[in-house]
């Protein structure tokens, strides 16, 4: 191969490595062990959040549940206060009476630099 081809391949490999590393460190809060637990008062979504970055004053955890045959969705925002760097905190939604079929957990960190 020519020298220019090698330089192009090396630059491409460097760009791929940079994107991979940036995406790997981008996820500041990791959702661990999300689960649906049933109790006498209904079903609730539970789990924990691990902070892999800098300390956070407030962490907003959005829990969306899907219940009933019609697929009724309900969103609840839980706020965890003062989550330190490297700390793990548990969360639990309020009990849902209707039969919950599915759920999702999302950590809302606000808008990104692109305004999304």
Image (cartoon, rainbow, N blue to C red):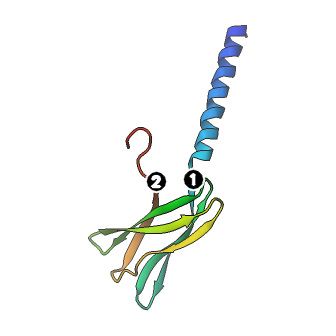
Image location (x, y in percent) of residue 19: 59, 35
Image location (x, y in percent) of residue 51: 60, 59
* For the residues bearing labels 1 and 2, Cβ distance under 8 angstroms: yes
Is residue 50 shown above or below 2? below
Q: Is residue 1 left or right of residue 74?
A: right
Q: Earlier in the sequence, mark 1 or mark 2?
A: 1
Q: Is residue 56 left or right of residue 108?
A: right
- Residue at 44 percent across and 44 percent down: it is 112
Q: Is residue 23 left or right of residue 64?
A: right
Residue 2 visible to an observer of this rendering: no
Q: Is residue 86 left or right of residue 97?
A: right
- Label 1 residue SS: loop
User: How many circles with numbers are drawn on the protein?
Assistant: 2
Is residue 104 shown above or below 28? below
Q: Identify the residue under disc 1.
A: 28
Q: Identify the residue under disc 2.
A: 109
Image location (x, y in percent) of residue 59: 49, 62
Q: Residue furthest bottom?
A: 40
Q: Quadrant of the N terminus?
A: top right
Image location (x, y in percent) of residue 95: 40, 81
């Amino acid at each position: 191969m020519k020298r220019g081809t090698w330089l192009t391949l090396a630059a491409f490999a460097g760009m791929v490595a940079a994107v991979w590393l940036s995406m790997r460190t981008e996820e500041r809060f990791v959702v661990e062990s999300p689960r649906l637990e049933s109790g006498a008062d209904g079903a609730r979504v539970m789990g924990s959040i691990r902070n892999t970055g800098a300390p956070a004053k407030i962490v907003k955890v959005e829990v969306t549940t899907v219940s009933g045959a019609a697929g009724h969705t309900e969103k609840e925002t839980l706020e965890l206060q003062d989550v330190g760097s490297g700390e793990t905190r548990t969360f639990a939604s309020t009990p849902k009476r209707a039969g919950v079929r599915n759920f999702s957990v999302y950590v809302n960190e606000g808008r990104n630099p692109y305004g999304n």
